[in-house]
Image (spheres, rainbow, N blue to C red):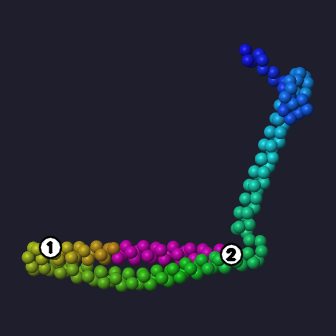
Amino acid sequence: MTASRFNPNHAAAGSANGGQFTSSSGSGSGSKAKAGKAAAKKAAAHQAHVAHEAHLAHEKYLASHPSTPAARAQQKAQLLDAAKADRAKVTVLEKQLKGLQDQEKKAAATAKHTKAAAANAKAGPKQKRTLAHAATVASKKHATVRQQISTLQQQIKDLNVKAAALESQAAKL
């Protein structure tokens, strides 16, 4: 019953005939005006979005292509400073590596000696077990030190590659 009372011809609230019913051929263009405003608002929002995306692309371009010589010099200095810091880290790691290599030599000699002592033991079974255990411990320590050396060498290699890449990038500026 309420459907029969509905009148789609109602003037827009802000119009001169606001809130009044109109004829179907009359000035019932309020819904058309609202649709036009909504389409215009949507188009404006799209234009704003496109402009924002263009701005972001421009900012990204400017970040990778400094336009002034001072900006290029500053970026080059930052890259060279980062490369210098990486080279300093390499120097510290190489000192650690030298210490680990000395430890590795001692651990290898100890493992070899304890293994030979265990093999040549003329004592009872308890002493042989103790010597065999000592040989195993020394051998594991040697393997651990070798693993540390390998890890440290990889870190040094990675830092050298990174520093070289930074220096190359700075040279292109």
Instruction: For residue 32, say whether it is visible.
Output: no
Q: Name, please, the residue furthest toward the top.
A: 1
The residue nearer to you, when weighing 18 against 162, is 18
Which residue is rendered at x = 25% and y = 80% of the image? 112
Let me know if residue 167 is in the magenta part: yes
Left or right: residue 79 versus residue 32 is: left
The residue nearer to you, when weighing 30 against 39, is 30
Point out residue 100 in the picture as x, y percentages from the top left corner. 38, 81
The image quadrant that residue 34 belongs to is top right
The span from disc 1 to disc 2 (Cα, nearest Å) is 65 Å
The label shown at residue 75 is 2
**The magenta segment:** 145-171
- CB of mark 1 within 8 Å of CB of mark 2? no
Which residue is rendered at x = 71% and y = 67% of the image? 63
- Circle 1 is placed at which residue position? 129
SS class of the residue under badge 1? helix
The image quadrant that residue 114 belongs to is bottom left
Left or right: residue 92 versus residue 105 is: right
Mark 1 Cα shell of 10 Å, populated few (<14), some (14-19), many (≥20): some
Which residue is rendered at x = 90% and y = 22% of the image? 25
* Nearer to us: label 1 or label 2: 2
Let me know if residue 163 is in the magenta part: yes
Point out residue 45 in the picture as x, y percentages from the top left corner. 77, 47
Q: Amino acid at mark 1?
A: Arg
Point out residue 107 in the picture as x, y percentages from the top left corner. 30, 81
The total number of labels drawn is 2
Mark 2 Cα shell of 10 Å, populated few (<14), some (14-19), many (≥20): some
The N terminus lies in quadrant: top right
Point out residue 8 in the picture as x, y percentages from the top left corner. 81, 23
SS class of the residue under badge 2? helix
Which residue is rendered at x = 13% and y = 79% of the image? 121
Residue 65 to residue 9: above or below: below
